[in-house]
Amino acid sequence: SIVEVPAVVLEGSEDGNTWKEIPFRYTPGQPTRQPRRTAPHQPRLDWQMWFAALGSYQHNPWFIHLLYKLLVGSEHVGVLMDVEESPWPPGSSPPKLLRSWLYHYDFTRLDTPWAHTVPGARILNATGKGEGL
């Protein structure tokens, strides 16, 4: 059987052409990275992102606020992300554009470390100028 785990993946860009994933500390993320979840630790932001993946951004207003804080470079939000792998670590200039995707991660396949698919279209685009928010 196939077990798919839904996850919202954030990407940032400086120019709208080149996009880089903004990794969370404990969500699946890049297929080349081993998942970092350990029980009983349950990181709040990553847990909320799982619920966001089960619904839409209209039902998760905190998600819009998260995007805004990332766009303005809030260090309080930046440290909640995976600061070791983030293309925009806390203290650096934030991305100019953000977009989010709903991925489905499949941990049951043997031909890849684990596959991720995009079952639908982009769920939200945002810019630092209030567009899309």
Image: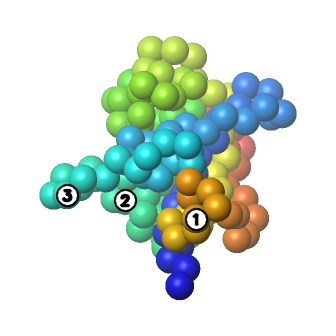
Residue at x-position 50% and y-position 77%:
3
**Residue 92 appearing in the image:** yes
- Can residue 130 be seen at all in this image of the molecule? no
Q: Which mark is residue 47?
A: none
The colour scheme applied to this rendered structure is rainbow
Q: Which residue is mark 1?
A: 110
Q: Earlier in the sequence, mark 2 or mark 3?
A: 3
Q: Looking at the picture, does residue 39 appear above or below residue 120?
A: above
Report the Cα–Cα distance between label 1 and label 2: 29 Å
Label 2 secondary element: helix
Residue at the extreme front: 110
Q: Residue furthest left?
A: 40
Residue sitting at x 72%, y 59%: 122
Residue pushed farthest right?
17
Please indicate whether residue 71 sits to the left or right of residue 130 in the image. Answer: left
Instruction: Name the residue type under label 3.
Output: Ala
Q: Amino acid at mark 1?
A: Leu
Which is in the foreground here, disc 1 or disc 2? 1
What is the x, y in percent for residue 4? Answer: 53, 73
Per the image, the residue denoted by label 2 is 48
> Picture coordinates of residue 82 (x, y %)?
42, 34
Q: Amino acid at mark 2?
A: Gln
Residue nearer the viewer, 125 or 79: 79
